[in-house]
Image (spheres, rainbow, N blue to C red):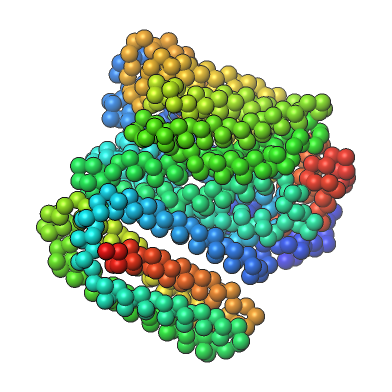
Amino acid sequence: MTSTALNLNYLQAKKGIFSWIFSVDHKRIGLLYLYSLITFFLVGATLGVLMRLELLNPGKDLFEAQTYNQIFTMHGVIMIFLFIIPSIPAVFGNFFLPIMLGTDDVSFPRLNLLSWWIYIIGAIMALSTLLFGDGPADTGWTFYVPYSVKTGTNVTMSVLAAFVLGFSSILTGLNFIVTIHRLKTPGMTFLKMPLFAWALYATSWIQLLATPVIGITLLMIVAERVFGVGLFDPSIGGDPILYQHLFWIYSHPAVYIMALPAFGIISELLPTFSNRTIFGYKAIAFSSLAIAFVGYFVWGHHMFTSGMSGLARIIYSIMTFLVAIPTAIKVFNWVATLYKGSIDVQPPLLYGLGFIFQFMIGGLSGLVLGALATDIHLHDTYFVVGHFHYVMFGGTGFAFFGALHYWYPKIWGRMYNKLVANIAFFILFIGFNLLYFPMMIAGLMGMPRRYYDYLPEFHLPNMISTYGSWVLAIGLLLMLGNLIAGFRRKHEKIARNPWGTGITLEWQTLSPPPVANFDRMPVLPKDGPYDYDHKPEIKE
Amino acid sequence: MEHTSAFSLPNSGHNRDAEASKMGMWLFLFTELLLFGGLFIVYMVYRSLNPESFLLASFELDVAMGTFNTIVLLVSSMTIAMSITAIQTGDAKKSIFLLYTTLGLAIVFLIVKYFEWSAKIHHGLFPGFEVYDGLPPGESLFFFLYFFMTGLHALHIIIGGIIISVVIYRTKKGLVTKEKYTLTENAGLYWHLVDLIWIYLFPLFYLIH
Ligand code: HEM
Ligand SMILES: [Cu+2]
């Protein structure tokens, strides 16, 4: 390498599309994921807004029932498999895990690139159902049997897409686990690792241990559709409840694949913007593992109404309540971190606080669904739709946006307009709550989910919800527009530590980082990653 | 920019790290076990729901062929283990020879499997054939799971064969040596897993009576 090449940052080092789509640099791969994820998110969000438009008034307005069913399935598949499951690990994990560990790449850089390609192939397969076959699936993203083996729509392709996407997820998880074990900078032990790395570690294990089960289950659906055998279809000897078990054995742990990385982001944002050490480092680190572990034994709470013995239901319900404990431990520690900190309210912190607020509503409404008596009433109503959007979108989605604002100056060496960012946040926040809180109320009133029509008595909450979706859409556009406009803004060179109070290793290198991540040996704070009393001085 | 001196980190993802590749392989093997684990659960559930039909159907399988294949795989596991020992002592020739033997045994396994499968299909015991479609649900499930699980396993044998061929090729090129034989080790790990899964499949389908 010539010395000029050494001086270039990772964005400048090579040019041309091929230097991106075949790059093995974890930073570029992170950005490849980012751009693809945002694209799919926008497609999914558009479908969401269209659904809300249909539901503005009772009666059929825009779509046939069948079309509506296909839209919510496509929306669910895109948001779950293409956006939220890869989201934080694939983008920010890829970009920042190696830097935070003080190394120059993941353990298997080429495998990393392969996982992005697999992701793209899976995405193309999922979207191809729009053009080929007998129309996109209309089963809901859960592909419940027996309907999914009977419907004429192209379930086979959607399910194969989910199978392929699972591979990508497994490879990323595997890569991170090995990277964390093997590539921490000298002096960094597990207990001196940033909490984001801890969160990714727990997440990666779930990806590894849960994804294969859904993979094989989905293949069984394909087999059943192709060969017409009765694996799950009761009319030819199969057991549909078995499918539900296998599906949720993965898909419940999968909600922690979505949530844990978000917890990791929040644990990074709070020390930086309170300028003090995180409260309860070990409690936060280990509660991730506890959540990952207990999360394996609660899948039955999705099946309280599907026919299960009373004893099994009680056990699943108790286990579900147990998950709340490590989760609450985290929330209390975050709040305690803010206590007596010198809080600097910057856009990323706003998203962090928005996360805590919304995730709490999502989490507590989850307990309502985890309790047997109330779930009988609320199962398959809009309460559930409200609940999981609060967790996935209000929680993980907001953490994702927070991370985007937090690391923006590091990734691109630019800065967005902070005032506009703050305004966008408040519009998003208001829009979000207007959109989803009424859904919970409609659910409590008894409105079932997955219908394109509803009884007139549900009109009011639905109207508010649809107005909310417009506010939210404006907020999203403003936020993204502001971030994109930031690329062109003229300003001073971005410092290594633009927030001034960042303490993890990524703030010791240049913004944007050089190809090899560091231009000099990173220095660890003396007592653990958030030791603000011995914060290493960072010279430009 | 003021930094002109080349700086490189000691702990690089681009260093050769045999430990890391082995760890990666182990993790991958976990996921493989879980993949089959899902199928084992399905097998167990349906066996407990239809004990008689599963029993009846299992008499159709050829225990002799199954036993023969089990021995073939066990021997192949041994030969690949020996090829690792050979490369460790620097004997590339012997290692290559043993890898070829393993590959040969894999092919024998597949040929036997082919005859087993075609005999079943010949008797109409495959989805879509009259005999199969006339079976009671329990028995047809047994046969379907038999085809699904041994089919997936056979696919793994094929992939394993490809991996072994790559190892042979790279050993011949001198890229696998006494100092650098992680590739052979990982191929061995994978092959043992394929063997291990068969060790479970064999009694489940052929032996439980
Ligand atoms: C613009 C933002 C969004 C809007 C307006 C929106 C709207 C909706 C609506 C109205 C439904 C219910 C369909 C029904 O039951 O009839 C729905 C379902 C769903 N949404 Fe969203 N959503 C948005 C964003 C998201 C995000 C960010 C995620 C995930 C991270 C997500 C995940 C889901 C899932 C998994 C379903 C269930 C699909 C099914 O029933 O199979 N949504 N969404
Ligand atoms: Cu769950």
Total marks placed: 0
User: Quick check: A139 above or below A182?
Assistant: above
Compared across the picture, whether B175 is left or right of A233 comes to: right
Compared across the picture, whether A1 is left or right of B109 comes to: right
Q: Which of the four quarters of the rendered structure image does ligand 1 lie in?
A: top left
User: Quick check: A41 above or below A181?
Assistant: above
Q: Is residue A340 visible?
A: yes
In which image quadrant can residue B33 be found? Answer: bottom left
Q: Residue at x 61, y 87 (%)?
A: B89
In which image quadrant can residue A517 be found? Answer: bottom right
In which image quadrant can residue B40 be found? Answer: bottom left
Compared across the picture, whether B174 is left or right of A499 comes to: left
Looking at the rendered image, the quarter that the N terminus of chain A falls into is bottom right
Q: Is residue A382 visible?
A: no
Give x and y (percent) for residue B81.
51, 79
> In this view of the protein, which residue sits in the foreground, A354 or B130?
B130
Compared across the picture, whether A255 is left or right of B107 comes to: right
Give x and y (percent) for residue A89.
59, 46
> In this view of the protein, which residue sits in the foreground, A500 or A162?
A162
> In this view of the protein, which residue sits in the foreground, A309 or A511?
A309
Q: Residue at x 68, y 53 (%)?
A: A98
Q: Residue at x 59, y 28 (%)?
A: A359
Give x and y (percent) for residue A307.
33, 33
> In this view of the protein, which residue sits in the foreground, A214 or A155?
A214
User: Quick check: A332 above or below B95?
Assistant: above
Q: Residue at x 83, y 52 (%)?
A: A523
Give x and y (percent) for residue B124.
14, 63
